[in-house]
Image (tube, rainbow, N blue to C red):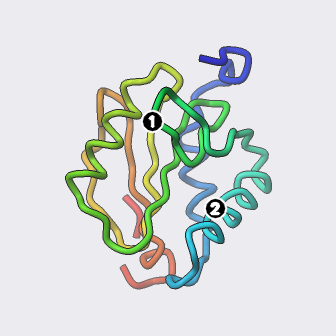
Amino acid sequence: MLECLFDAEPDFPVVLNALRQLRVHALVEERVLHEKIKDVLRANNIGYRYEYALGPRNRVDFLTFGGTAIECKKKKPNERSVIQQLERYASFADVRSIVLVIERYHVLPPNIGGKPCASIGLNRLWGFGGVI
């Protein structure tokens, strides 16, 4: 745990609002999506670590200094494996909240491992569906 990085106040609502600004074509590669997320986080002055290793075999796409884990998925991943992955992330002290950024909206419980959780569907941000 890198306490010096994560002394910031929890930033879950701020991160959600920032990620709602994403406008990404559904067919972009995941690396392009990562670059767009970096741009949005920087534009909103949200500090983060990219490809942050929470522990062995547990590397989250982004972890903000306020402790929000951001995981990106393209297409339609297996629902059970996504939930299991997010449960693993939630078990780490560095993670205070979780946001799943996914091409097609994916219903998540409001809390995973006792930590706030939300899903942002990129297709809904374009008006094909919303963000919960």
Left or right: 43 in relation to 18: right
Whichever of callouts 1 and 2 sits on the residue coming sooner in the sequence is: 2
Q: Quadrant of residue 28?
A: bottom right
Q: Nearer the viewer, mark 1 or mark 2?
A: 1
Q: Residue furthest front?
A: 56
Q: Position of residue 47 (x, y in %)?
A: 74, 39
What residue type is disc 1 on?
A: Arg
Q: Which mark is residue 81?
A: none
- Residue at coordinates 53% horizontally, 24% vertically from top-left? 94
Picture quarter with the N terminus: top right
Taking depth in this image into account, of 64 and 124 the one nearest to the observer is: 64
SS class of the residue under badge 2?
Answer: helix
- The 10 Å Cα crowd at callout 2, few under 14, some 14 to 19, many 20 or more, is some
| 114 lies above or below 71 | above
Q: Is residue 115 above or below residue 93?
A: below
As helix, strand or loop, the secondary structure at mark 1 comes to: loop
**Residue 80, percent from left and from top:** 20, 52
Q: Residues within 10 Å of mark 1 (few under 14, many from 20)?
A: few
Residue 128: image location, x then y, percent: 40, 84
- Residue sitting at x 63%, y 24%: 9
Q: Is residue 104 left or right of residue 61?
A: left
Residue 57's label in the rendered image is: 1
Which residue lies at the image location 56% right of the left edge and 68% below the top edge? 30
Question: Quadrant where the C terminus lies?
Answer: bottom left
Residue underneath mark 2: 34
- Classify residue 39 as left or right of residue 23: right
Identity of the amino acid at label 2? Answer: His
Total tally of numbered discs in the picture:
2
Depth order, front residue of 40/52: 52
